[in-house]
Each structure stands twice: as structure tokens, then as C-alpha cells.
Image (cartoon, helix red, strand yellow):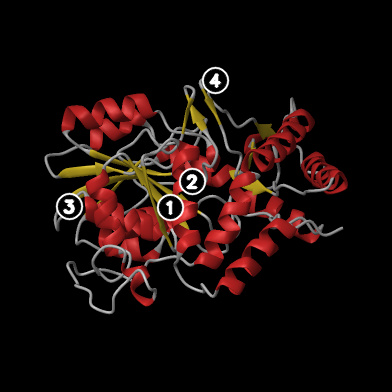
């Protein structure tokens, strides 16, 4: 059997939404995008939502909105996708890496506090795998040191922290709608915030810095005459993506329930297995379960993580690793980053891989993944 790492959950509802946009003649950003922004903002309880073409764009615009400057520092966890740090470099600012908690793979708030300097301007907590970070502690530190909090919620729709849905806690929250995410539009992202001025700035910046409502300029409601009021970017999304997003948003909690069901199947099957270390979700929050991290107890095994990954691949089970710590990459090594000082992220990296978990995953596929994992481990015990 072949089990993919991810399979998009697309139904006739998504297809009909795209066809409707095609028939309306809106191939780029238009009224469906505005509708999607409003629906998404209402869902996560955010007064302002700005649709863009990726989570990376949302993070970039968020840093632009807070006024990040060359020489500033931004705290970023070691274990994240490179986009979380790369956007800091766009400004000539420096990402400062913070070690993670070994139990949750979330930014360690105690380590975060140690890294704050007079140059620190912001923090980007990454809600790993769908589990929210320690937002009360992060917001308290941010207030104490006058930092902006830009949540990287690429994995975290929907997720809840102490009863609050992610999307309205930090100063700005960035979501991803990439093909593998919990709401998928192929490519896409959203920035949410309570600050109307920041949202207005991001709306202008996403479309070349052209004055407000530039997307209407080819309609009867618009005008060919416009002004460029900022040096902007080409970050707008399209109505085709928004049509997918609207359909996906209507079933986002059902898709979350499906991922949660699969996670519970894995938890039950792997409970007490001597070659595994359970991943921890803290009791005061709810994970979106974008990822299911499988953590190996290496001292019980004669093989390492890479060998387990290869054995699963040989059996037709596609996996991934989330994530290679940023300091492992050539670019960051050339710029002075190293593994020194990050023992917890190294420990996690050596032991962790991610199993398939997606809505629409069949019971026989789940059973096959479980059997493959247990068979490989049990043939490799010391």
C-alpha cells in the first residue's frame, strides 16, 4: 500500500466555487477575496483580516506594519520553517534563535526571556504542529519589553489557547493556506489583527502600494486614476483561491475533527511502546493537529531516525521531518549561527519525524501506517 504524507480534501463545493468565480470573470483579486477576508475574520474573532498569497507574505507585511528597521532583532524559534526567519532578513534585521521545549517543540519562554536585548523589536512564536505557544507568558514579556508579537499560525487553524481561538491573541497573526495546510487554497495566507491602521497598511502594501481598493480600478465602481502611496509588493491573492478558501472554511472544524480522530488512533496504538516518546499537548490548549510528531526513544533502538524514515518509505509510507533547525542550513551557518546553545532542538531533531494525518485518510491507511511503524520498531529493539 502507498500512503501519501498528505492528500487535499477537495469536494464538489470547492469545484463549484472556483467555477462560479471563473464564470464571474474574476481571475485575480476581487469580491470573493473580500468575502473570504470577512468570513475568516469573523471565524477567528479578529476585527481585521487581510488576504495575501502566502503566510510568508503575511509575516513580511506584519513586520513592515510594526516598523521593523535594519539592526533590529526578532526572536524566532530554532525549529520552524525557514520563512519565519527569512522575512526578518528582508529588513536588514537579525533573527535571534530561541531554543524549544523538548516535550512540545514550542518556543521555550524561559529561553526567550534570556535572548531579549535593547535591540529586540518583536517575537514570532510558532504554533508547532497546531499546538499554541504559551501566549500569556509571551504577551506579558512583550508588554514588559515593548515588543510586537506576530504569531506564526501556519499550522494552527483551528486551534485554541485557554478557550480563545488562535487569530486574536497576538498583535498580528499570520496563517497559511498552502496545499498541505488545514485550510488549503493551493497557495495563500491571511494576516489578522485588531489594529485597523496596520490592516489598512497591509492592504495597500499587498498590491504595489497602490491606494486603497485598487482591485476595483477595472470595474464601474473604480477609476483608472490611482496613486502609489507606499513602496509595495505583489502579494495579493485571487478570487479563485478565495473561492477554495470559503468552501474550506465552511468545513474547517469537520476537517479538524478528522485529524483529531487520526491523532487519537495513533496515540492509542503507540501508547506504552518502549521505542517511542509521546508528544505532549498541554492541558489548557487544543491543537489543530496539522502534524503528528512521532518521537523515537533512540536508546531503545539499534537504528536512528533516518533509518526509520527510510524503512517507512520502503513500505510506501510517506513521512516528513518538521523541522530541520535553522542553524543547520548553509546560509545561517555562513552568517554566524551554530548548534551551540540549542541542546533541546538538537534532541528533538534527532528523534522526530511526522506521520501522515489528513482529512479523508482511510481507516486501512491509518492501520497500515500503525502496523508499519510498530513492525519497524519491534525489529530494531536492543
Q: On the image, numbered disc 2 is attached to which residue?
A: 40
Query: Where is residue 300 shown, x and y percent of the image?
Result: 69, 34
Q: Which residue has dot 3 on it?
A: 67
User: How many angstroms separate mark 4 from mark 3 (CA)?
Assistant: 36 Å
Decide which of 126, 8 is in the foreground and name it: 8
- Mark 1 or 2, closer to the camera: 2
**Residue lying farthest left?**
118
Q: Dot 1 corresponds to which residue?
A: 190
Viewer-side label of 2, 3? 2
**Foreground label between 4 and 3:** 3
Q: Crowding at label 1, few (<14), some or many (≥20) Cα neighbours within 10 Å? A: many
Q: Residue at x 37, y 29 (%)?
A: 135
Looking at marks 1 and 2 on the same chain, the residue that comes earlier in the sequence is marked by 2
Q: Quadrant of residue 234?
A: bottom left
Camera-nearest label, 4 or 2: 2
The numbered mark at residue 226 is none
Could you classify mark 4 by the number of other residues whose Cα lies within 10 Å: few (under 14), some (14-19), or many (20 or more)? few
Asked if the residue at tag 2 contacts the one at tag 1, i.e. Cβ–Cβ closer than 8 Å, the answer is yes
Query: Which residue, given by chain and number where applicable, does mark 4 sit on?
Result: 283
> In the drawing, does residue 368 fall left or right of residue 200?
right
- Residue 144 relative to residue 87: left or right: left
CA–CA distance in space, label 1 to label 2: 9 Å
Please state which of residues 255 and 75 is positioned toward the viewer in this rendering: 255
Image position, residue 99 (x, y; %): 38, 39
Dot 3 falls on a residue whose secondary structure is loop
| Vertical side of 174 occupied by 233: above or below | below
Give the SS element for disc 2: helix
Relative to residue 144, is residue 16 depicted above or below?
Answer: below
Amino acid at each position: 500500500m502507498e500512503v501519501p504524507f498528505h492528500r487535499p480534501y477537495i469536494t464538489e463545493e470547492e469545484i463549484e466555487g472556483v467555477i462560479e468565480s471563473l464564470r464571474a470573470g474574476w481571475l485575480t483579486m476581487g469580491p470573493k477575496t473580500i468575502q473570504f477576508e470577512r468570513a475568516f475574520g469573523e471565524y477567528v474573532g479578529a476585527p481585521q483580516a487581510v488576504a495575501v498569497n502566502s503566510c510568508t507574505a503575511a509575516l513580511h507585511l506584519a513586520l513592515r506594519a510594526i516598523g521593523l528597521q535594519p539592526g533590529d532583532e526578532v526572536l524566532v524559534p530554532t525549529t520552524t520553517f525557514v520563512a519565519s526567519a527569512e522575512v526578518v532578513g528582508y529588513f536588514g534585521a537579525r533573527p535571534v534563535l530561541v531554543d524549544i521545549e523538548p516535550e512540545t517543540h514550542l518556543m521555550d519562554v524561559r529561553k526567550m526571556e534570556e535572548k531579549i536585548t535593547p535591540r529586540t523589536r518583536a517575537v514570532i512564536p510558532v504554533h508547532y504542529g497546531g499546538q499554541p505557544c504559551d501566549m500569556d507568558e509571551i504577551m506579558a514579556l512583550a508588554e514588559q519589553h515593548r515588543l510586537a508579537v506576530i504569531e506564526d499560525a501556519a499550522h494552527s487553524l483551528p486551534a485554541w489557547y485557554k478557550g480563545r481561538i488562535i487569530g486574536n491573541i497576538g498583535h498580528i497573526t499570520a496563517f497559511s493556506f498552502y496545499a498541505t495546510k488545514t485550510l488549503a487554497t493551493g497557495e495563500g495566507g491571511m494576516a489578522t489583527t485588531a489594529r485597523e491602521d496596520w490592516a489598512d497598511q497591509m492592504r495597500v502594501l499587498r498590491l504595489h502600494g497602490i491606494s486603497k481598493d485598487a482591485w476595483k480600478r477595472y470595474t464601474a465602481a473604480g477609476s483608472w486614476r490611482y496613486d502609489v502611496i507606499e513602496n509595495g509588493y505583489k502579494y495579493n491573492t485571487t478570487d479563485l483561491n478565495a473561492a477554495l478558501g470559503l468552501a474550506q472554511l465552511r468545513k474547517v472544524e469537520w476537517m479538524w475533527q478528522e485529524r483529531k480522530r487520526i491523532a487519537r488512533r495513533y496515540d492509542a496504538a503507540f501508547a506504552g511502546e518502549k521505542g517511542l516518546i509521546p508528544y505532549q499537548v498541554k492541558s489548557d490548549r487544543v491543537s489543530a493537529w496539522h502534524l503528528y510528531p512521532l518521537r523515537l526513544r533512540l536508546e531503545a533502538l539499534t537504528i536512528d531516525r533516518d533509518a526509520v524514515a527510510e524503512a517507512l518509505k520502503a513500505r510506501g509510507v510517506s513521512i516528513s521531518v518538521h523541522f530541520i533547525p535553522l542553524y543547520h542550513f548553509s546560509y545561517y551557518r555562513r552568517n554566524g549561527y551554530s548548534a551551540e546553545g540549542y541542546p533541546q532542538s538538537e534532541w528533538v531533531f534527532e528523534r522526530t519525524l511526522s506521520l501522515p494525518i489528513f482529512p479523508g485518510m482511510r481507516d486501512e491507511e491509518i492501520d497500515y501506517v500503525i502496523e508499519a511503524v510498530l513492525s519497524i520498531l519491534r525489529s530494531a529493539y536492543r
